[in-house]
Amino acid sequence: EAGVTQFPSHSVIEKGQTVTLRCDPISGHDNLYWYRRVMGKEIKFLLHFVKESKQDESGMPNNRFLAERTGGTYSTLKVQPAELEDSGVYFCASSRGFEKLFFGSGTQLSVL
Amino acid sequence: AQTVTQSQPEMSVQEAETVTLSCTYDTSESDYYLFWYKQPPSRQMILVIRQEAYKQQNATENRFSVNFQKAAKSFSLKISDSQLGDAAMYFCAYRSSYSMEYGNKLVFGAGTILRVKS
């Protein structure tokens, strides 16, 4: 079975620009999570979708971040406008239930 | 709120030797899960081992084993017979057992870089 797919793998943008990250979960996985790791720090939870609904968005840092999961399939995470402190690796993960979590390889975002 | 602390930013081990990575956590819950994830240069997060807090027996997966000390809130990872392929970033993570409320919301430590010398 295909794993969790994220793209782009890398994105370099200037401060003030908009970037959209995409995550394709494993087929059939209702649960989709976004995490991010800012350089040298912990990986932090951003939000959790169950199908198309946001179950928990307590980790979203501010209203410059918008996550969607239309139709309960793939998800996008938009950052608008991007700031320097948004640089880091953004991970997506999915699971069928609450057992094993499968991670993607992440998107490395660099805001200059 | 739960926290996870990995006090070793970087560790080195000689090939075929044994290394232990440290992890401590803080929680007021009595039931939870603990994990070790490996992140190689490819950035793909791979689950190494999982421990359920209500189980006293330490989890083991081939060359990987944990020392789970619930009272001390300590969860160290031991890698035996280290191989070059073990070189990676290792993250310790905590998850509440209350799945319906928290799902797979993990709390991670800052990670430990493991270097394996040939």
Image (cartoon, rainbow, N blue to C red):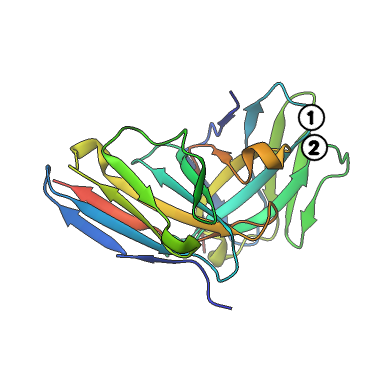
Q: Is residue A105 visible?
A: no
The residue positioned 63% from the left and 38% from the top of the image is B102
- Name the chain letter of the residue that bears numbered label 1: B
What residue is at 50 percent from the left and 59 percent from the top?
B117
Between marks 2 and 1 in the image, the one whose residue lies nearer the viewer: 2
Residue appearing at x 79%, y 33% in the figure? B31
Q: Is residue A16 left or right of residue B86?
A: left
Please, is residue A69 above or below residue A57 in the view? below
Q: Position of residue B33 (x, y in %)?
A: 72, 41
- In the rendered image, the quadrant that contains the N terminus of chain A is bottom right
Based on the displayed image, in which of its 4 quarters is residue B98 positioned? top right
| Mark 2 burial class by Cα count in 10 Å: few <14, some 14-19, many 20+ | some
Residue at screen point 33% across, 65% down = A7
Residue B82, x across and y down, in percent: 63, 60
Do callouts 2 and 1 mark residues in contact (Cβ within 8 Å)?
A: yes
Choose between A22 and B68: the one closer to the eye: A22
Q: Is residue B16 visible?
A: yes
**Residue B107, position in %: x, y?**
56, 37
Q: Position of residue A9 (x, y in %)?
A: 32, 64
From the viewer's perspective, is B41 left or right of B98?
Answer: left
Q: Secondary structure at mark 1?
A: loop
Q: Which residue is mark 2?
A: B53
Q: Disc 2 is attached to a residue of which chain?
A: B
Task: Looking at the image, tell me whether mark 2 or mark 1 is earlier in sequence order.
Answer: 2
Q: Residue furthest right?
A: B56
* B117 with respect to B53 (left or right): left
What label does residue B70 carry, if any? 1
Q: Secondary structure at mark 2?
A: loop
Q: Amino acid at mark 1?
A: Lys
